[in-house]
Amino acid sequence: MNCLICSKCNRKYDLFESVWMCICGGFLDIQLRVSFDPETLKNKPFSLWRYREVLPLHPDAIPVSLGETLTPLLPIDISGQTVHFKQDQLFPTGSFKDRGSAVLITHLNYLKIPSVVEDSSGNAGASIAAYSAKAGIKCEIFVPDSASEAKLLQISRYNAIIRTVNGSRKTVAEAAFKIAEKTYFASHYYNPFFIHGIKTWAYEVCEQRRWSAPDTVILPIGNGSLFLGAFLGFQELKASGVISKIPKFIGVQAKCCAPIYKAIHPFCSVKLNDCQTIAEGIAVSDPPRIQQILSCISETGGDLITVSENCIKKTLQEKWSEGYYVEPATAATIAGVTLYVQQLTNDEQIISSFTGHGLKYSKPLPNSH
Ligand SMILES: *Cc1c(COP(=O)(O)O)cnc(C)c1O
Ligand SMILES: [Zn+2]
C-alpha cells in the first residue's frame, strides 16, 4: 500500500493525511509502488507532468503549474571532457526547486491546506512562495539575514510574508519549525512530496539519453533534496527495469561548510563553519537527512568533493565570461565537476546541473575571504 512512513519509528500514515512530521518527531518518507513504462509517455505534454503517473498525487489533484517545461541537457567542455548540465536554472522561479514545489503545492492544494511556512536561504522560499501564490495559499518564509537581496525581493513580490532571522541556517530552521506546529511545514528537505517532485530530474535525464543511465551524477548538497530526489528517481527507474544501473553519486559542498565530508572523514582536520560561503544555496551545516545522503553515496560507490571559496569565485567569473549566467552554488558544483574530471583515468558519462540562475545573485562578488 502507498503510504507515508516515519523514517525513525516506521509508523505509517495515510498518503493523503495532512501531516508533515511523525508524532515521534521523525521526518516522513513515502512508501510508493512504482512501475514505470516509457511507452505510456506517448502524447504526453513536454513538461514535468508527463511523469505524473509516478508522482504520489491523488488522481483528483489538479496540477498547480507555472509551466514546468523539460529542461535542456547542455554539453559543456570541462577540462577536455564533455559533461552534460541540466539547465534547471530555466525553471519559472529560476532554480530546480520548482520541481519539488510544483508537486508539493499541488498536493497541499488538493488537501485544501490554507497556509504554509518554509525556511530557506532564498531559492526554496521563492519557489514555494510562487506556487503558493498560484494556488492561493498563504505563505510565510523564514530566511537568514544574509540572504541575497534579489531572492528576498522575489519572495516578497509573490506576496509571501518574510521573517528575517539573525543567525545560522539552523536557527532559521528552528524558528520556522516553531510556527509550523500551528500551520503546515512546506519544507523542501523535510517534506517527502517535495523530494518526489525532484525525482523527475532523473526521469528527464534518462529520457533525454534514450532511457539509459549515465555513469556518474555530480550534484551540490545543501539539505540534499536534489541529491536524494535524483537518487530516488534512478532507483525507481532501475526497479521498473527501464535502466540497468544506478549511477555513481558524487556530492559537492563548500570547503567551509561540508558536514557530509566531515561525516565521511571523521578524523580530518577540516573545520566547519569557519567562514560564510558565497554559495548560499548549499550553506547548510546539519542537513536532517544526512544518513540518507551518506547511504546514497556509499551504495552507489560515490564520494564527496569540497571546493574552496576562491575556486567557487574563479569558476563563477569564468562561467559568466563564457556566457553562462549562474549563481554561486552552481559555480561550486561546476568547480566540483572540474576537480572530479581532472582526476579521471577513464572516460565517464557525467551529468550535473545548473541549479540556480545568475539573476538571483545581483550583488558584487566579495573581494576576499
Ligand atoms: C537549494 C539549492 C542547492 C542545494 O540543494 P539542496 O536540495 O538543499 O541540497 C543548490 N543550488 C541552488 C542554486 C539551490 O537553490
Ligand atoms: Zn515516528
Image (cartoon, helix red, strand yellow):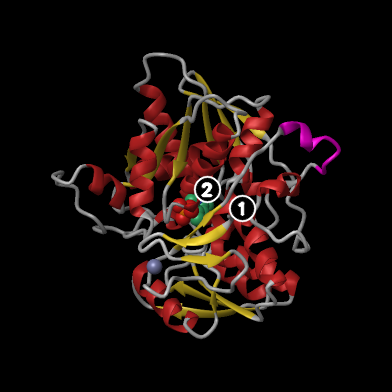
Which quadrant of the structure image shows residue 105? Answer: bottom right
Residue 21, percent from left and from top: 46, 71
118 sits to left or right of 8: right
Q: Is residue 148 visible?
A: no
Residue 179, percent from left and from top: 47, 83
- Kind of residue at disc 1: Gly
- In depth, the one of 1 and 345 nearer the eye is 1
Question: Secondary structure beneath disc 1?
Answer: helix
Q: Which residue is mark 2?
A: 229
Extreme-front residue of the structure: 1
**Quadrant position of the N terminus in the picture:** bottom right
Question: Secondary structure beneath disc 2?
Answer: helix
Picture residue at 36% right of the left edge, 58% below the top: 287
Within 8 Å of ligand 1, the CB of disc 2? yes
Q: Is residue 362 above or below residue 164?
A: above
Picture residue at 51% right of the left edge, 86% below the top: 182
Which quadrant of the structure image shows residue 155? Answer: bottom right
Ligand 2 sits in quadrant: bottom left
Residue 35: within the magenta? no
Q: Tally the marks.
A: 2
309 sits to left or right of 36: left
Q: Is residue 368 visible?
A: yes
Residue 2, percent from left and from top: 58, 56
Q: Which residue is mark 1?
A: 197
Picture residue at 63% right of the left edge, 38% below the top: 203
Q: Is residue 195 above or below residue 314?
A: below
- In depth, the one of 172 and 303 nearer the eye is 303
C-beta proximity under 8 Å, tags 1 and 2: yes
Q: What span is in magenta?
A: 38-45
- Which of pointers 1 and 2 lies earlier in the amino acid sequence? 1
353 sits to left or right of 102: left
- Kind of residue at disc 2: Gly
